[in-house]
Amino acid sequence: MFTNTALVDTHAMVSKVAYGPLAADEEVVDMRHLDASRFMLPLGESEAVGSPYRTNLLAPWNRGQYLPMRFSDGPVAAGPHQTLTLTP
């Protein structure tokens, strides 16, 4: 694993974390306005074979798109919601 983090200016940071040939996590963090920060998982949100979320982020990643990172209450409440219930 390697991490490559660059300070873009005094208020923004770009970070890429890789576990192999592809970046596993890419983030652009705006330290002045955290809700303006963006991230991307190059393949998808799941590693489970057959999951619809295994490659759901591949197309946006290919287009160079990033997804919003929500930190404050308003953007979190306005964002999409799903609930995952884990049962032993």
Image (tube, helix red, strand yellow):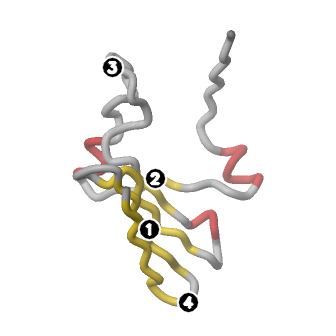
Badge 1 amino acid: Ser
Which quarter of the figure is the N terminus placed in?
bottom left
Separation of marks 1 and 2 at Cα, in angstroms: 14 Å
- First reached walking from the N terminus: tag 2 or tag 4: 4
Separation of marks 3 and 1 at Cα, in angstroms: 27 Å
Mark 2 residue crowding within 10 angstroms, few (<14) / some (14–19) / many (20+): some
Separation of marks 2 and 4 at Cα, in angstroms: 22 Å
- First reached walking from the N terminus: tag 3 or tag 1: 1
- Left or right: 8 as drawn, with respect to 80: left
Q: Which mark, by number, is residue 25?
A: none
Depth check, mark 2 against mark 3: the one in front is: 3
Q: Residue at coordinates 64% horizontally, 73% vertically from top-left?
A: 33
Q: Which mark, by number, is residue 15?
A: 1
Horizontal and vertical percent position of residue 25: 41, 54
Depth check, mark 2 against mark 4: the one in front is: 4
Depth check, mark 1 against mark 2: the one in front is: 1
Task: State the SS at label 2.
Answer: strand
- First reached walking from the N terminus: tag 4 or tag 1: 4
Q: Which mark, by number, is residue 67?
A: 2
- First reached walking from the N terminus: tag 2 or tag 3: 3
Work out whether residue 81 or residue 13 is closer to the camera in this orientation and state it.
13
Separation of marks 2 and 3 at Cα, in angstroms: 23 Å
**Which residue extends farthest front?**
1
Mark 1 residue crowding within 10 angstroms, few (<14) / some (14–19) / many (20+): some
- Left or right: 46 as drawn, with respect to 37: left
Horizontal and vertical percent position of residue 54: 35, 29
Which residue has dot 3 on it? Answer: 49
Badge 4 amino acid: Thr
Mark 3 residue crowding within 10 angstroms, few (<14) / some (14–19) / many (20+): few
Horizontal and vertical percent position of residue 13: 49, 76
